[in-house]
Structure formats: C-alpha cells, structure tokens
Image (cartoon, coloured by chain):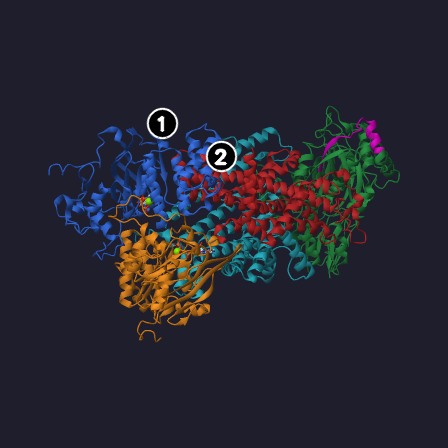
Chain colours: A orange, B blue, C green, D cyan, E red
Amino acid sequence: MTASDEPSDRPLLEVRNLRIEFPTRRGTLVAVDDISFAIAPGEVLGVVGESGAGKSLTGAAIIGLLEPPGRIGAGEILLEGERIDKLPYEELRKIRGKRIGTIFQDPLTSLNPLYTVGEQLIETIRTHLPLGETEARARAVNLLEEVGIPAADERIDHYPHQFSGGMRQRVVIALALCAEPRMVVADEPTTALDVSIQAQIISLIKRLCRENGTAVMLVTHDMGVIAETADRVAVMYAGRIAEIGPVTEVVKHAKHPYTHGLMGSIPAIGHDVDALTQIDGSMPRLNEIPTGCAFNPRCPKAFDRCRVERPSLMPAGRSSVACWLYEDEAKEAAHGG
Amino acid sequence: MAEATIAAEKPAEAGNGNDMLLEVDGLVRHFDVSPPFLNRVLERTGRRIVRAVEGVSFSIRRGETFSLVGESGCGKSTVARLVVGLYPPSAGTLQFEGVDISSPRARRENPTIQSRMQMIFQDPYASLNPRWRVADIVAEPIRVHRKGVSRTDVLARVGELLRQVGLSASDGEKFPHEFSGGQRQRISIARALAGEPEFLVCDEPTSALDVSVQAQILNLMKRLQKRLGLTYLFISHDLAVVYHVSTIVGVMYLGRLVEWGPTKELFGAPRHPYTRMLLDAIPDLEMSGRARIPVAGEVPSPIDPPPGCAFHPRCPLASDRCRQEVPKAVGSATAAVACHAVEEGRLPPWHGA
Amino acid sequence: KELRFAFQGDLKSLDPYNLNETFTLGFLGNIYEGLTRRSPDLSIEPALAESWSIEEPTRWRFNLRKGVKFQDGTELTADDVLFSADRVRADGSDLKTRLAGVVDVIKVDDHTVDFVTDAPNPILHAEWSTWYIMSKAWAEKNGATKPQAATGNEENYATRHANGTGPFMIETHEVGVRTVAVPNPNWWDKATHNLTKVTFTQIAADPTRVAALLSGEVDMAYPIPLQDQARVDANPGTRVLAGPELRTIFLGMDQFRDELLYSNIKGKNPFKDHRVREAFFRAIDIEAIKAKVMRGNSQPSAMMVAPGVQGGGDPRFTRLGYDPDKSKALLAEAGYADGFEVGMDCPNDRYVNDEQICLAVVSMLAKVGIKVNLNAQPKALYFKKILAPSLDTSFYLLGWTPGSFDSWNVLYNIHGCPDESGKGKFNLGGYCNPKVDELTAKVLSETDADKRAKMVSDAWAMTIEDISHIPLHQQALSWGVSNKVELAQRADNEFHWRHVTIK
Amino acid sequence: MLALIIRRLLQSVMVMLTVALIAFIMFRFVGDPIAQMVGQDTPIADREAMREQLGLNDPAPIQFARFVFNVVQGNFGISYQKGVPVDELILSRLPATLELSFVAALFALVVAIPMGIYTGLYPRRWLSNVFLTVSLLGISLPTFLIGILLILFFGVMLGWLPTYGRGEIVDLGAWTTGLLTESGIRSLLMPAFTLGLFQLTLIMRLVRSEMLEVMRTDYIKFARARGLSNRAVHFGHALKNTLVPVITITGLQLGSIIAFSIITETVFQWPGMGLLIVQAIQFVDIPVMSTYLIVIAFFFVIINMIVDILYHVVDPRLRAETGGKGH
Amino acid sequence: MSDTTSRISDNIDRFFDSDVWWSFKSSKVTIGAAIVTVLIIITAIFAHWVAPQNPFDPAQLDLLDSSLPPVWYADGTWKYMLGTDDQGRDILSALLYGSRISLMVGGASVVAAALIGVTLGLLAGYLGGSVDSLIMRVADVQMSFPAILVALLIDGVARGLLPNERHDELAIWVLIIAISLSTWVPFARTVRGSTMVEKNREYVQAARVIGRRPVAIMLHHVLPNVMGPVLVIATIGLATAILTEAALSFLGVGVPPTSPSLGTLIQIGNNFLFSGEWWMVVFPGIQLAVLVLAVNLLGDWLRDALNPKLR
Ligand SMILES: Nc1ncnc2c1ncn2[C@@H]1O[C@H](COP(=O)(O)OP(=O)(O)OP(=O)(O)O)[C@@H](O)[C@H]1O
Ligand SMILES: Nc1ncnc2c1ncn2[C@@H]1O[C@H](COP(=O)(O)OP(=O)(O)OP(=O)(O)O)[C@@H](O)[C@H]1O
Ligand SMILES: [Mg+2]
Ligand SMILES: [Mg+2]
C-alpha cells in the first residue's frame, strides 16, 4: 500500500465507464450507463438523483454486491489503483468491511434481530482484525462510544430491537467502521431518520471521516444533506451522471438543466414563492429511456441534437456536465488547455 | 403585557362562527398497548398506554392551510386520523362547521360531513388498491356518496378529475402499478377531490416523493386550493415544505402542540426551544455556514413521557420548573407558545434564519 | 422350534364363550378343550370325556377323563363341566346354542356328568368340540363367572387370560398385536407336535401377509388371497394348502316381509314369488365366479351343505342352469319386465373374496335388469345389521358350516320357520315351509341312519324346489405354509397346532 | 416467560376441554352406548337399569363433568370391540407409534434441513433442482403406495428388511422399545422412511423458501457488506433466522406425524395406535375413537407448548421483558 | 355492453402481457403440468364419452373378461387397452371415472374449505379482537387434527349416525365435508395474515374515510388482494385433498367400491401386486401420482409467479 504516503493526487477509488445491466425477458436493461468518477482520500463525494437513478446500484457495484441478475456490463472499478470488479468472491469479501465500509439506508432492517449488537460487532471485528474475544469486545465498546452511544459497555449486550432508530443507525455506522476502512459507501444513511437525528448522524459521519481521513461516497436524494456534507457532488439522472463538480458550484451555479430544475424545486425557508420551479413529467423507466439525452423530453432548453445524440460529460467551469448546451464552452476550455 | 399572558386554549378563537371550518378542542387519543393481563400480574407491570395525542386544540379557517410539524412519533398522523374519523377520540371534541363529529355515531348521523372531508395519504404505493382500475378508484367516493348517478356521468366526472390533476382521462383504464409515484399521488388527489370535499387532510403527501415530483404535487395542491377554495390540514416533518404551503403552523411534540403561529412569524422568530431546534437541524442548502449546535437526544417514548414539559430532557433552557410543571400555551389566539422559559423571559434571542 | 403364523383377523378375546367365530374358537381350541374333539379328518374323538353313552334317548352320560389338570394346576372335575354348562348359557355368551335343548346337567359323581334333553337328539355332542370346559375355581377366583361384565365398565378377566386344559398355554397376549403360546407340559395327551413356542400375529392387509410369508417372517399364514396362490407356490420356500372347506356360500332373500326394506317395489315383496327367486338363481353364472373370482378354488354347489357334511353331495340335485334369457323371461312373467332395485348386504372381510363375489352377482343381476345396491362392510357391522333381532336386510350373502357336520343343523338353523325356541335363528330371510319343519323335527330324533338319510334328502328336495336360498359354492381353504412346516389342514378351517411339526 | 407458559397452559387446558367435549359428544350421542355394551337379547328393563347405573340419564353437563373426571384419572372405559380398558389398550400401543413417529421425524429433519439449506442457498444449481423434483414426488405419491412398493422391493424381492411389525421388542416396564434390538431397528426402517418422506418434503420446501426469503433481507446484505465469510452469513445469520418459522411449522408437522402414522401402520401392520384407530373406526368403537382423539390432542398441545417456548428462546424480540427497555 | 366486452378482451390482453403469463410460458415444466392437468380434468369430465366402458354400471361388466392384461400382452385385447381388474372393469375407463370422483371430491372440498377459510380469515383479520381470538383458537384445535384423522373421525361418526345403506350414498359428501373441515385452516390463517396487513394499508383507510362499510371493504378491497395466496393454497390443497381422499379410500372409509375413485382402485389393485396383475395398481397409481404431481407443480409455479419478491 503505497497510496497512503503519496500525496492525494492518486484517487482512492476510481470508477471508469461503469455499466450495470439487468438481463430481463424484454431485453437487457441498462440501469447504470457509462459512468465515471473518482474519490480522493478524505474526500466526501455526494451522489444525488431521483429514486431509480442508479445511485444504490453504483454503490452496490463498488462493494461487489450487485444482486443477481444484475451484473457489471462494462467498465472498471479501482480501489487504490487495484482493480476490484473482477476479483473472485473471496478476495472481494476481504475488502468489504476491511477496506470499504458500508452503511445502508434502513437501520431497522440492517441488523440481524437475533444477535446482540455486541455479537455482530465482535464478529465483524474478528473477521478482519487479528484480535481475541476480549480485545474485540473492548474495541466494540470503544466504537460504540465513539459513535455516541451512552453507557456503551452495557448497551453492547442489547438486541437491536432495544435501540431506537437513531441509535441503531449509529450501531450500523460503528459496524461499518469496525476495521477502519479507507473508504465508506453510505447509501442514504439518514433518509429514514428525523431531521434532528439526521443532523446528528451527518455530523457524526463527517467527524469520523475527517478524523480518519476516510473517503466517503454519500448517496442520498436530499440536496440539503449534500450541501452540508459533501466536497464534490455527482448528480445522476436515469443511470447517467448529468453533472459532477464541487458542491458549491453545483448547488449555487447548477449548469445542467436538470440540476437547475432540481435546485429550484426544493422549497426553502424564507423563500416566498407562489409556486416552486417544476420539472414536468417524471424520470423515464429503464426500458423507455429516450434516445439522445435522457432528459430531453422534460428539458425546457432541449434542441434537436439533444433528441438524437447523447452527450457525455464535458468540462464546464469547475464542473463537468453532460449537456450539449455546454459543448462550446467545453471546446473552448479544451483549446485553452 | 396583561394581554400576552392570557392563556390561549386555541390558536384561534371560534368566535366568528362560519369562518371556522374545523375546530378541535382538547383532543386526546390514547392507545392501550399493555401486555396481556397475565404478564402484567406476574411481572408486576402496569398498563402501558401510548399517549399519542395529549390534549390538542386548534381550529382551521376556511380556505387556509393549517400545518402540523414535528418529529416522528409525536402524534401528527394520529391527529389526522382523529380528524377524518379513522379513530374515535379518547377525549376532546371535533366540530365541523359547528357540528359536533367527535363520536363515530355523530359521524354516521352526518354522512354529508364525512363526504366533505377527505384524506391524502403518505404512501402513493399503498394508498391505491392495486386490483382496481384507476377509474374505479377515483369513482368510489362518487358511487358511495351520490348514489344513483349514471355510469356515464360518473365516467365523465372521473375523466374530468383526472385531467384536473394533470393526468389524461384515458389513464382511468389502467391499473395503479402502471404509474409512477408522483402520478399515483395525483390519482390519490383525484380520488379525494371526487367527493367534492371542502376540507382535505394531507398526511405527509410528499414525503415519499422525490423533490422534483414533490414540487409538482405541492404546486398542484396549491393550485387546487386556490381554484376550489379548499382547506387543508397539512402534515409534514419537512419544515421547508411546511413553510412553503401553510398559513398557520403548529409544532407538535409528544402529543402536544408546543407552539403555533402564522407561518412567517413562527419561522421568522421561533420561540419554543423545540421549534428552534427543528429549524437548526435543517441542512443548510444556502451553505451560509451558520453555526449550528445539533441538539442531542431523541423523542422520548410516548408511553411514559417525561414529567413536566416533555421537551425538558433535550432542552438547553430546562429549569426545575420545566421538570415538574406542564407549561400552558400562552399567547394570542393566532400565535402562542407553551414554554416556561418564554413565559419567564429566559429565552435567548433567535439568531435568525 | 417356534411356529409363527399370521391370520387376517384378530383374536378378539380369550374368553371361549365370547364369540362364536371360527378363528377365535379354533385358536382357543389349542388352549382349551371340550368334552370331545375332532381329528384332522373331522371325526369325533374323546377328549376331556373319555367316553360317553346314551343312557336314555334324552339322557347322555359323559365319563370325564381322570387326572386332567388345568393349566393353573387344578384338577378337572364334574363341577367344572357344570360350571361351564351354566356359563355358556349365561347372558353375554355367544355360544348358547351349544347346549340348546339341554334342560338339565347333572353331576353323577366327580367324573361323571349327565345331560338331559327335552327331546331325543342323536347329534347332541356334535358341536361340543368347540364348547370348551373352563375351570370353576379359576373363574370364581378372578370374577369371570359370566362371559361378559354386565356394566361394560370393567374388563372381564377371561378376556385376556386363559386357563384351559389344552396342549398349549398362553404366554403373552397383547391385544390386537400378537399372542404367544408355549406347550403345556402337563397335557394329558401325548404331544405329537415338536413346537416350543407359537406366535400369532394379526396381519390384516393381504399383501403384507403374503409378503411376510414369502420373506419367511412367518411360517404359516392364512388365508392366502386366491390370486397370490401361484406366487406362494412358485416361491421356493413356501406352498399353498388348498383343501375344500365345508362352508357353503349362499345368497338369502327376505321372503317374509310384505314389503322389502330395500327396494323400489312398494306394497309387495318380489321375493315371495318363486319365479323371481328362480330368475335370480338363473342369472348367476357360477362357473364364471368359480373361474374368475375364485380362480378355480371353489366347488359350485346345488345344495346348502358341502359334500363332506352328512347329507351333502347328494347326486339327486343339480344346480339350475345359468340362463339369463330365461331369467329375464321369468322376471317378465312375474311382472318385473323392467327389473327392480334391491339392496344387498355383503361382508367384505369374512369369506374368501366375499365382496368380489357380491360385486360379480351385482353385475350379473344387472344384466337381467335387476339393479342391486351393494352395501359391503366389515363383518362386525354386517352381522350386527343382518342377524336377529334386526334382520335388517333384503338380500344378503352368507356362508355356513354346520358345526355338527350334519344337515340337520342347516335345516334347523337356516331353513326352519323362525320361532322363539331358536329354530331358524339364522333363517334371515324368513323362509318357511311347515313340511320341511316337520321333517326336520323327525330327522333330529331319528336314530336309524338310513331312514334319517332319506328324510334329510327329502327335506333338501323340498327346500331346493322352493329355492329357499341360492347356494353358490363351497369355498376352498387357502393356507400358505413354509416348507419347513408339516401340518394337518382341517376342512373346517381350524388350525390345530398339535398336528404341526417343524423341520 | 412465566406468563407465557402459564398462558399456554391455560390455552392448552381450554383446547383439551374442547376436545374432551367433542369426544364426549361422540361417546354419548353416536350410537347408543348401552346397545354397544349388552347382548342382543338383554331385556329393556335391564337396559334401563344399566342406563341409570351408568348415569346416562343425568343432565348432559353432569355427564360431561363425569366424563372429564374419568378422563383425567385415565379412565376411558372399555373398548366395545376388544373388551379391554381403553387406556391400557392405548398405552400398550403408544410406544410403537411414538417410536415410529419420533424416528420418522428425526429422519425427516436430519435430511430435510440440510437439503432445504442447500436449495435455499443455491437455488440455481442443478442439484437443487434434483432435490426439488424428488421432493415433489414425495408429496405427490400416496404414502400407502410407497409403503407397498417398499415392501415388494426390499422385503420380498431383496429380502433385506422385515415386511411387517416391530420385530423383537424389549420391555422396559411401562415402555416397550424396538430400538434396542437389531430386528427392531430393521423393522423400523421402512415404516419410518415411508412416514417421514412426506414431512421431509414439507420441511425441506419450508426451509428452502424461508432461506430464500431471509437471504434477501437487508441484514444479510449488510452482513455480506461487512465482509463476513459465507459460512458466517449462511449459518450464523441466515440459518438462525430461518429457524424461527421452521420451528413452528415443524412442530405442527410433528404433531401430525403421529396422526399420519395411521396409514403407515396399516400398511406395515405396525402395532401402534394408528392401526388401532383404523379398526376402531371400522367397528365404530367409540371409546377407542374418543380416547385416541384426546391422546392426539394432548400430544399436539404439548408439542405446541414446547414449540412456543423454543420460539421465545430463539427470538429475542419475543422475550422483550427480560432485557432493558428500548426507546 | 360493448364496454364490458372490450374490458374483458382488454383483461385478456393484459393477462397475456403479464408477468404471470410470461413466467408460465417460459417454464416448460409448468406448461407440461398444465397440459397434463387439463387433459386429466377434461377426460374425467367427459369420461362417459371418452371411456370405452362405464365401469360404474355393473351391467357393462363381464366377469369373464376379468383380470385381462394390457393389450401388449399375448392375451390382452384392444377392447381393454390397459387390461381389466378382477371384476372385469376396463382399467382405462375406471381411470377416467375414478379421476372424476377424485377430482370431484378434491375440488369440492377445496372449494368448501376455501369458502370457510376465507370467510373466517377475513372476519378474524379485519375485525380482530375477540372474534379473531375465537376463530384462531378454533383453528388451533382444528390444526391438532390432521386431515386424515378428522376425515376418519367424521366418517366414523357418520357411520354411527347415518343408517347404513345411506352411508354409501352419502360417502362422497361425508368425504367432502370431512376433508374441507380439516383443510380450511391454512386458508383462514393466510387470509387473516394478509388481511391484517392489508387492512392497515392506506387504500383500506382511504375507503374508510370515503365512508364505505366494513363488509364492503372486506369484499371489495381486501378480498381481491388476498386472493393470490388463496389461489396458491387452493392449488396445493387440491393435490392434498386428492391424496387424502385416496388415503381414506385406501383405509376403507372412502367411496364405495362400486364407484371407485383412484384411491379405491389402488386399494383394490394392491391385492394383485404379488400375483403379477400389476396393471390393476400401477395404472391408477401412475394416474394419481401424475395428477397430484401436475397440480403440485402448478401450485409451485403459481406461488412463485404470484410472489413479487421472487421475481
Ligand atoms: N433486480 C432488478 N431488476 C431490474 N431492475 C432493477 C433491479 N434492481 C434495480 N433495478 C433498477 O435499477 C434502477 C436503479 O436502481 P437504484 O436502486 O440504484 O436506484 P436509486 O437511485 O438508489 O433509487 P432510490 O433513491 O429509490 O434508492 C431502478 O430503475 C431500478 O428499477
Ligand atoms: N394504532 C396504534 N396503536 C398503538 N400505538 C399507536 C397507534 N398509532 C400510533 N401509535 C403511536 O402513537 C404515537 C404517535 O404516532 P403517529 O403515527 O401519530 O406519529 P407521527 O407524528 O405521525 O409520526 P411519523 O412522522 O412517524 O408518521 C407513536 O408513538 C405511535 O407508535
Ligand atoms: Mg437507493
Ligand atoms: Mg405519520
């Protein structure tokens, strides 16, 4: 592992041209189509997008847990420069939990109801670290304390159903961080929680990652959470990345018409508008994604080319956008560069 | 000064009769979740009562939107269900246009009132019967409440309703699974409108939807309100949405209304520490970098709520009095707060949004 | 040397007066003994009575064998015989008829008993080989002095315990599972068998029973289903013993009711019409039944008694020929051109292929237009239904072996006009010809053998003329025996272990 | 837990009382008990006297109370058909049936659970399809046919196994067992297989579908995401969660095995309660029928109780009282 | 009028476009099972046209033709393709008529059981409370007695109560009642479970807010949504009911031998297994096993097809 001593120009995780498919009776569905991004050590990459945009699938592909019949159709996934998408199951298993931690959306169902929290923690710790039972337990108690569970040494022997939702999500985070992974994939870690708890969990994740220099891929559809947490953000639409860039840039100067509409449709306190900006229609189903730009039927600025040819990511300002509107700008930038 | 300390029982006085569409007074709803008798005897535990709603009073003026916000489990949905009669109240009264509809019997005796209030549910996937065609779903209230309407009239009306919510009349032939979440919520709204209601109870109608779809639905609801003069009881935990849609906002905590007031006032100058906490917790899209201290702790169990002010375990301003005495709502009819700290003037200034 | 054998049915009770049924009595004949017994060729031999004589026409004297001990060690005396005579006639006994006509039992001395009858009876003792003598002392000690406890709330001791004088003693008796017997070392007679143990198991299912024999798990099993005889014979270690049985299978018809219980003919009884009875007789293709149902193992019979029985096999009689056309004509003549419906009762576990015979009869009668509604059921229910006092039947199949191997038994029980005395007790159809009755009464007291034979023959001629019943055939015994075993097969289908030797 | 046991006990008593009532009604009203007891020529007067003596003229509730009282004392009356006390009859047959059922159940469980796990974990492998197909045969072939075919093949044609009965049995006082002798065990093989086959299929399919269900849950996904080994995921997490429903259904099935032994016992002339009841039914031997009913219900109730308690042992959510409180 | 027809044709189109149909089409085994089932049912229903002989009519039986082997044996004839039994019944005809009895008993008892179970399950699930406890306790008691036993007992009781000659006539009804009384519990349990889930679904609450009465809600809203599992149970229940009938006939308490069901045929044929007249048991055995297997396969497929989670 040379990555840690080198400066962070080498990304921790790199996804190149990833394509995820589902063979079905009506042909192959492409749920994630040719997406590429990278996450540097210590960086938080936010992934936003509507339900069904392919956010969770991307996360699942990274940890190698696509559920059959889903499969990676093309592309590569590199962790610290090493390809992991083609690894045999057993190799990949050793990466999961050890080098990539995972947090799922629903803390209610993520924990096995029949085992105590401690048992699940210790099991995970001992799978990845050469620790004895008592050491593992001590570590588990520490972890619980770290994620803010009071009276951890007592609560460790409780069953999941004896915890509240927020507390359970903390346990899930503790489980994901058991072996101090370099990277965490968090799939909507706060969606099921109340705003007040949500704030607690977000700041917890942020703190833990800052302290350990862990890279985070934070999947959510809550723009607010992204704005507060992420360094960079990728906006997904119908299985593709519509826009990716630094968070301030995307939030404040959204370039893609979709991002733009999205930002406008979020009500905000203090903003008195009679009607919210509204993107008409809904995201297409996977089997009826239009040709050209997937967003074109809903796009107020669509022109002919959008309906025919599919744009790929092109640099625009500090972000990259998949939109023909920015073709000129991108060309200029290319010339300039 | 003297005026300000008048204990207000309700957000708005029911004084000028006709104006008030719905008046709720001292509404209480308890659920008995006790273990079976034998367990209680053997384990020497008492009854376990969920105090889901613990004395809520408010009234809604015709054409307005009254919103309830609060964390999960604080009793918002229970209030909604009490209002539409899905649960009978344990105590307290409900009046619709001055007619008492507290008991199930009273409701049966006033069937027209039942048809004038409808409900929109949270889950667009669960709120439509998957085995029914959309047209039948939308037509159900018409068929129930206006018997004898001819089939073609019903169909015509259904088509009209569907168009009204932005779908096409031909969509009536389809089944719900052929629609996306946002479209289903439109169907729900069409169904609710089919009874020609004046009053709509909306229990988190958009929280299962994506923001872009949420915007469509919120816009639609506002449009319909204007066009049809609807009155809404709107429930949400999303403060921004509430800010966007409501006229008056009530903040609930553990079965009680802790603060209410006109939307702008309440969000502009929240007084109850809980309201402030909620506002603080909203992620900051503007990235204004405001300093926030996320409040610790979670909502206690409504089975044995803390004594005194239920919020005191999480409240930075809690005093001994807060731990013992339940604060009364103090303020005018339209804006009040139930907090000892406010009453005692211990409240620090609001940093402003 | 252990003999393991299996039978289709169950050993109901060890009480020898509980059930008048061949298997139970046959089994208990190994444990208990009567005053007389029968040899393998069925001739009467002295058993507990060394000898007997007819002192007067109505007084028989029996001299008991001396030194006979019950299995519990007590000695057999005249008191035991008196006791047994009382007990067998007591309420709950199924064998009351054994002493029918006996008015008095007199103890002459400890080893002599006199039986006084109300009328002369030359065959008084003919059925006594299955009237077993019980020990008075033992019965009294165990409270088993009556055949069945009246309240039904307590078990009778004799139901599961036995104390006979016979060649074998019960070792264990697991009700409905198996019964184990061992030789009685103190038996008065010289043992001709070489057994050390006998194990009986009920195996109700035919295939399982055959399988047990084929696989050598039992040394003897019966009955062997007719269709499996070839298989048993072909099997290297086993063979079938298929001698003729004295039982005659016949059909009976209700001839006394004015309206049949089970028929669509109302207001009259077709069976009262001789033509109908003949039509039924002629509709039955007995050769087909023999060939197909019985697979050759039956002897079609013109008479109600088997050739081995006194008076049976009389060449004077032949069966009415199978003639469906004539049958139809007769029916038409009797006014039933379109036939009629009648219910038929049939056992399904009593005789060899009983249900199949009934089914065949049903099908044959159907061809002449008679629709028969068959009600086939297990024997317990069947007998409860058809036997007196209910006589709840219109048309039935029954089999009969005269216990005395004498025609009188059949003429009296099955053809006699029923009355209080017990005459015609099994005349379930109520056939009544006073002339036959008259002759039967004479037969009983006639002591001259030739005259008696002539009278019997004449009586038969009358009943056959009347078509009182429709005799079908004598069924064949069908025992499956391991080649290790030598035994004597008795025509009455009783299995006596004292004739068994095992290689 | 205590409350649970007490409640279950109370429920069991209720169930038993209901069953006793059914048995009583059968006993009392199906056919005339007196007619079953006495000979055909017993005079009416005697019958009336007996009726009085047996209390058959008392009001029905009193008769029922007496019936229950007798039943509790183990007094079930005398078999009409065999003339011996029914309790002795049943008790003498009980060991045979219980032994057969137990071995059959054990066989079913031991084979079915691994097969179910395998097919649940690897639903697409060919071996799983083989298991599934074979198991379908198990619930499609009538038990009695299987029994006969087994007898024909292993008993008669090959001569390997005894064709009927229990073989040599050893008497252990109140219990008789065939498990201690070679012939007893050999005799047990075919009946136990026949009886167990149906249950085996059911349990296997149940385990499989539960396993499939559990494997789709979030906590399994999360367990994988934590990098736990397959073994830990399959056996530590999935299997244990599968067990909860499997225990219930299996428990119920075990109860029914005892009753299903009727057919097997008939085919193999196995001297158990099933054989007894078939004969009893053919002869309308009501005391035996009603006793059998009560005995079966008793077993069911016991098994159910054990299952319920096991259930609580396995699933911590159900023993919430013992731990600290949530929220 | 045309509206309804177009709706129906629409429904049919929709069905052929549905996942259920697709999963059916793509499973060869299921198609096979369906063909076999339909074939057996049709030949059973039209047995009196299809079968060469009416084996229930004693007049058509000829004892002299009994125990004939199937046609491919030297002494077999085309008249009795699959041979005859010991009464001269044509095995092929007996199979068809026997299947009819088996299917009738199985089908009727499943329908009856489903009616009882669905009604009770709906009531228990929707009303809850003491109605629920009562029904479920009854179900508990019922569960302690497996079908065979209940049927045996009911049959035993019927023997005791009914006059004997009526027994055969009523045997089929006794069987149907017995089997349905012993198999309604799974229906009730499943429907109750689903109903409890469904009644808390928002569409049911919406119906309540609209003001529909509980019975209407149960029938129009809840019932259609719990029919999926009911269908699955019914299919598998049909298989079990057929087997139960066969088992009862085997034990001698089923239908009378004059109108034998498949079970009775097997029971009769059983006795001829050792004597080499195998066709008497083997053909009915195969027919029964194939029928039950096919129905089971259909049930299995239906369960998977209707379970959205498995797709
Ligand atoms: N097993 C599957 N078969 C077919 N399509 C699937 C399957 N699993 C997921 N998909 C499709 O893949 C697309 C992307 O799914 P994914 O779960 O990644 O969305 P998401 O962005 O995480 O949405 P959400 O916000 O709802 O979690 C969806 O349209 C979904 O329908
Ligand atoms: N039928 C019921 N039986 C028992 N407890 C109930 C019932 N309905 C609601 N509760 C309890 O009452 C309390 C208030 O519930 P309610 O659904 O009104 O909350 P809410 O504010 O709508 O929460 P959410 O935001 O999660 O929808 C909760 O603790 C809940 O568990
Ligand atoms: Mg997702
Ligand atoms: Mg709610």
Residue B353 image offset from top left, x and y in percent = 21, 51
The amino acid on which the numbered mark 1 sits, given as a three-letter code, is Glu
Q: Which residue is mark 1?
A: B109
Q: Is residue C330 magenta?
A: yes
Q: Are marks 2 and 1 in contact (CB under 8 Å)?
A: no
- Answer left or right for A179 relative to C163: left
Residue farthest along the right direction in this orientation: C316
Q: Quadrant of the N terminus of chain E?
A: top right
Which region is colored magenta?
C326-345
C233 with respect to D176 (left or right): right
Q: Position of residue A194 (x, y in %)?
A: 30, 51
Q: Which residue is mark 2?
A: D63
Check if residue E41 falls in the magenta segment: no
Q: Amino acid at mark 2?
A: Gln
Is any atom of residue C381 visible in this view? yes
* Above or below, comparing residue C459 to residue A154 in the picture: above
Decide which of C120, B37 is in the foreground and name it.
B37
Q: Which mark is residue D20?
A: none
